Amino acid sequence: MPSTKPLLATLITFPTMTDGRGDLVALETNTPNVPFTLKRVYYITNVPQGQDRGGHAHKALEGVLIATSGTIDITVDNGHDRESFTLDSPHKGLHLEAGLWREMSNFSEGAVLMVLASEVYDEADYIRDYQAFLEWVKQ
């Protein structure tokens, strides 16, 4: 039976200004590229080969994930369905709304994952256990 709840993950292609000097990608808050007010930026780098990241969901935080360098696979799960995306360009981002379980894997050598977040860090916003996430989705 198909899920009635959409995955809520959207791949975004950012407008890019290109000339002989290279590419410029400008991201602005509260636009289709970053559809929320930006409150935090962080990035993940130097992930050892074969190491996964993520393995959690957020109750309120939404974000845009960008591979500024290298390639990274992102799997999202809404408690009913799973979908995978490969981020392989700084010209694309993956918008994740709140309430999605996320797993990051297959970091290539030199990969950098930048996250634009709608909220400041708050441990209470995290669900770090998958079974607890499934229970939370049912509520």
Image: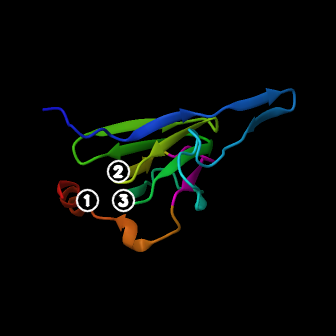
Give the residue type that dot 2 points to. Answer: Leu
Question: Percent from the top left, x then y, of residue 98?
Answer: 39, 53
Q: Secondary structure at mark 1?
A: helix
Looking at the rendering, the stretch of residues picked out in magenta corresponds to 107-118
Q: Nearer the viewer, residue 112 or 92?
A: 92
Q: Kindly give the residue lying farthest to the left in the view shown.
A: 1
The residue identified by callout 1 is: 133
Q: Residue at x 36, y 45 (%)?
A: 76
The residue identified by callout 2 is: 100
- Specify which label sits upstream in the sequence, 2 or 3: 3
Q: Residue at x 50, y 69 (%)?
A: 121
Which disc number belongs to residue 56? 3
Q: Residue at x 66, y 44 (%)?
A: 27
Question: Percent from the top left, x then y, of residue 48?
Answer: 53, 55
Question: Percent from the top left, x then y, of residue 38?
Answer: 59, 56
Around disc 3, counting alpha carbons within 10 Å, would you say few (fewer than 14), some (14 to 19), or many (20 or more)?
Answer: some
